[in-house]
Image (spheres, helix red, strand yellow):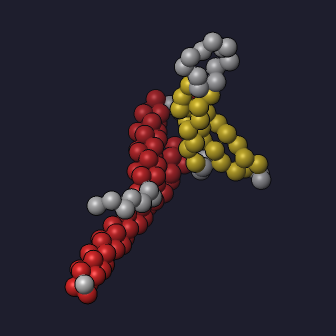
Amino acid sequence: MGKIRMKGLEEVEREARRILEEIELRKKRIEELEKREEELWSRLEELGFPKGTFIPKYVRCGKKKCKSCPHGPYYYLVWKEGGKTKWKYVGKVLDALEAKKRAEAKEIIEELKRIRKEKKMLKIITLSP
């Protein structure tokens, strides 16, 4: 009976080590993504964007019988200015940029969206092997 308990304990210990290793790998990847995010935000600031966060927002169109509501996601740039929270629809910010900058900004924004999704997935801890 003692051998059965030891074998079970060893399996639990192995699984715990595997989970801890996975957590460490995820932490490292999140750090890499955050570093890349900072680089991308710096580039966006150079293009004329205020420093902030991209927030996906779903909006209702106002039509009573619309079966597609809410629509979106529409991405907004959110930042603090003078103690107040400012929201600006990303499409409007992009429209104000010249064509070359607009194309680069769109690529950066898409990469920031991908990073956000990957970070969100990495923070979900699953215990299955």
Instruction: Please state which of residues 116 and 121 is positioned toward the viewer in this rendering.
Output: 121
Question: Which residue is found at the position 56% from the left and 44% from the top?
Answer: 54
On screen, 94 above or below 38?
Answer: above
Instruction: Please state which of residues 72 and 5 is positioned toward the viewer in this rendering.
Output: 5
Q: On the picture, is 14 further left or further right than 112?
A: left
On screen, 125 above or below 121?
Answer: below
Residue at the limit of the structure toward the front, as seen here: 1
Instruction: Please state which of residues 13 and 79 is positioned toward the viewer in this rendering.
Output: 13
On screen, 14 above or below 63?
Answer: below
Q: On the picture, is 60 further left or further right than 117?
A: right
On screen, 1 above or below 66?
Answer: below
Residue at the limit of the structure toward the bottom, as seen here: 2
Query: Where is residue 19 drawn, in percent x and y?
Result: 34, 69
Report which quarter residue 36 is drawn in: bottom left
Residue at the limit of the structure toward the right, as seen here: 83
Q: On the picture, is 46 further left or further right than 19?
A: right
Question: Which residue is found at the position 72% from the left and 47% from the top?
Answer: 85
Q: Quadrant of the N terminus?
A: bottom left
Question: Which residue is found at the position 42% from the left and 33% from the top?
Answer: 103
Query: Where is residue 27 drawn, in percent x and y?
Result: 41, 66
Instruction: Please state which of residues 7 and 125 is positioned toward the viewer in this rendering.
Output: 7
Query: Where is residue 105 drawn, in percent x and y?
Result: 46, 39
Residue 11 in view of the camera: yes
Q: Quadrant of the C terminus?
A: bottom left
Query: Where is residue 101 drawn, in percent x and y?
Result: 46, 36
Q: How many marks?
A: 0
Residue 21 in view of the camera: no
Question: Which residue is found at the position 67% from the left and 14% from the top?
Answer: 64
